[in-house]
Amino acid sequence: MSESFDFDKYWIGKLAKGIAEEVGDKIVKKVLKRSENISQKSHRDDVFKWSDSSIRKLESLTNDEETKKILLSCACHQSPEALQPYRDLYFETENIDLMIQKMQEDFEIFIKDALKLDDKYVQEIIDRRMGFAGIRDGNKIIATKIPKSAFIKEWFEETDSTKKRALFCHCPRIRDVLIDKEKILPKSYCYCGGGYYQNIWETILQKSVDIEILETVMHGDEVCKYAIHLPELNEKS
């Protein structure tokens, strides 16, 4: 990623696009008021305050489902190339469980080889079934994020719950201010994190899925956890 890349402006652009597509440009102007003052160089407290005000304004101007769709659209995504093998495997076998098994195997290789974690942390991540594969529970997948990769060791060793939530959070826009337990954005903001899983499963299945927030460090939970509700599928055993 180039030094000139500004994640805050990039994220605000995705928010604007999502609002425009879902409810129109008039709402964009109201929600994004003063967004021109927010950038990667802004103090994180200012980013947090703007985000809090903007998400609350969005919630006041849209219904719950519209808010959800808009914030899901702001997510970071896996590349289509990375997901293609799982899509191919699913359409070849029509077996979600087999595909999840493959996803989990690849994820375990990643945390061992790419992240180069100590065995004890690798095993705990596996035992807690963190990662993008998740666990199937009937017609839904329960997915628990891993802590932010740069801070995994610190997260496992930290005993203060407030510090742990800041270490866990994947969002570069507001992670640093979560050390203050009084700083809490509306829960709907975390649909942005859920959009990561929405993209994975919709790319693989080529069908719509529904995302539910189960736990989030923003609101005091130890981890961020989502349910991916699957559409009706024709599966082979």
Image (cartoon, rainbow, N blue to C red):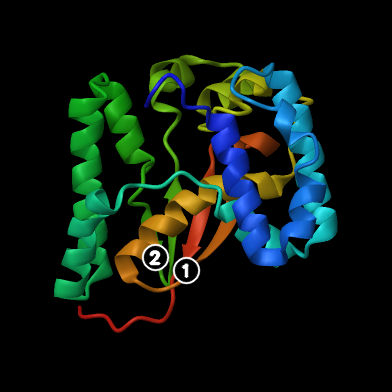
The answer for how far apart the CA atoms under marks 2 and 1 are is 6 Å
Position of the N terminus by quadrant: top left
- Secondary structure, mark 2, is helix
**Residue shown at the point (25%, 65%) measured from the top left:** 97
Position of the C terminus by quadrant: bottom left
Q: Residues within 10 Å of mark 2 (few under 14, many from 20)?
A: some
Query: Does residue 164 sit above or below 138 in this rendering?
Result: above
The residue beneath circle 1 is 209
- Residues 46 and 101: in front is 46
- Residue 51, by quadrant, is top right
Query: Does residue 125 sit above or below 21 in this rendering?
Result: above
In percent of width and height, residue 223 lies at 53, 37
Q: Residues within 10 Å of mark 1 (few under 14, many from 20)?
A: some
Residue 68 at least partly seen: no
**Side of 196 where 1 appears, left or right:** left
Q: Hey, what amino acid is under mark 1?
A: Val
- Residue 224, by quadrant, is top right
Query: Does residue 212 sit above or below 115 in this rendering?
Result: below
**Residue shown at the point (21%, 76%) measured from the top left:** 94
In percent of width and height, residue 60 lies at 85, 55
- Residues 68 and 110: in front is 68
Please say if the residues under marks 2 and 1 sit with CB atoms less than 8 Å apart.
Answer: yes
In percent of width and height, residue 96 lies at 27, 68
Query: Does residue 9 sit above or below 58 in this rendering?
Result: above
Instruction: Pick whichever of labels 2 and 1 is earlier in the sequence.
Output: 2
- Secondary structure, mark 1, is loop
> In the rendered picture of this protein, how many numbered marks are placed on residues?
2
Q: Hey, what amino acid is under mark 2?
A: Glu
What is the number of the mark on residue 202?
Answer: 2
